[in-house]
Image: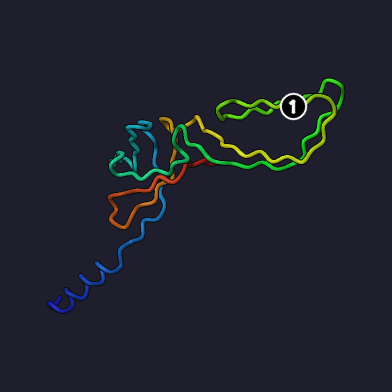
Amino acid sequence: MDGISELAKMFRERDNKNYLGPQTGIVISPPPNIQVTLGKKIVLTKEHLIIADHVLKDYQRELEIKGNMQTSGEGGSITLKTSSTPTIYTVVTGNVSANTTIIGSMKYTDTLKTGDEVILVPATDEQTYFLIDKAVRL
């Protein structure tokens, strides 16, 4: 092959990298010192991973619940407790019918565990991976 053909081949190879796309890995050590296997030979550590917050323990998310609240019967009661200081309790007994909006937060107590399969997306440098979620196979 002449020099110009060789140079053209090198440019083609450089410009047409194979797209890796999303991949899966297996958690071999959970957070905070997470390790994830990628294939049989690669182990990704926290230095290689950017992790979605919702898969970590103590992730907290704000939520709003709207709807109708109803009780019936003599013994029906509803207790609402605030987490503010001072704590406020509202207790309603008897028959209740009301439109209600509850605004609060939900705290997740689970996290990634050894053996969990996770979804990984490589960055363009192929040295950093985005751990976007736990994978589930049906």
Q: Residue 81: x percent and y percent?
A: 64, 27
**Residue at (52%, 40%) from the top-left corner?**
136
Q: Residue 18: x percent and y percent?
A: 33, 61
* Kind of element beneath mark 1: strand
Residue lying furthest top:
75
Residue lying furthest left:
3
- Location of mark 1 (residue): 78
Of residues 96 and 117, the one nearer the viewer is: 96
Q: Is residue 5 above or below residue 38?
A: below
Q: Residues within 10 Å of mark 1 (few under 14, many from 20)?
A: some
Q: Quadrant of residue 26?
A: top left
**Residue at (82%, 31%) from the top-left corner?**
96
Q: Is residue 101 above or below residue 93?
A: below
**Residue at (29%, 53%) from the top-left corner?**
126
Q: Residue 88: x percent and y percent?
A: 63, 27
Of residues 135 and 62, the one nearer the viewer is: 62
* Residue type of the residue flagged with mark 1: Ile
Quadrant location of the C terminus in the rendered image: top right
Q: Residue 51: x percent and y percent?
A: 39, 43
Of residues 110 and 91, the one nearer the viewer is: 91
Residue lying furthest right:
73
Quadrant location of the N terminus in the rendered image: bottom left
Q: Is residue 55 left or right of residue 13?
A: right
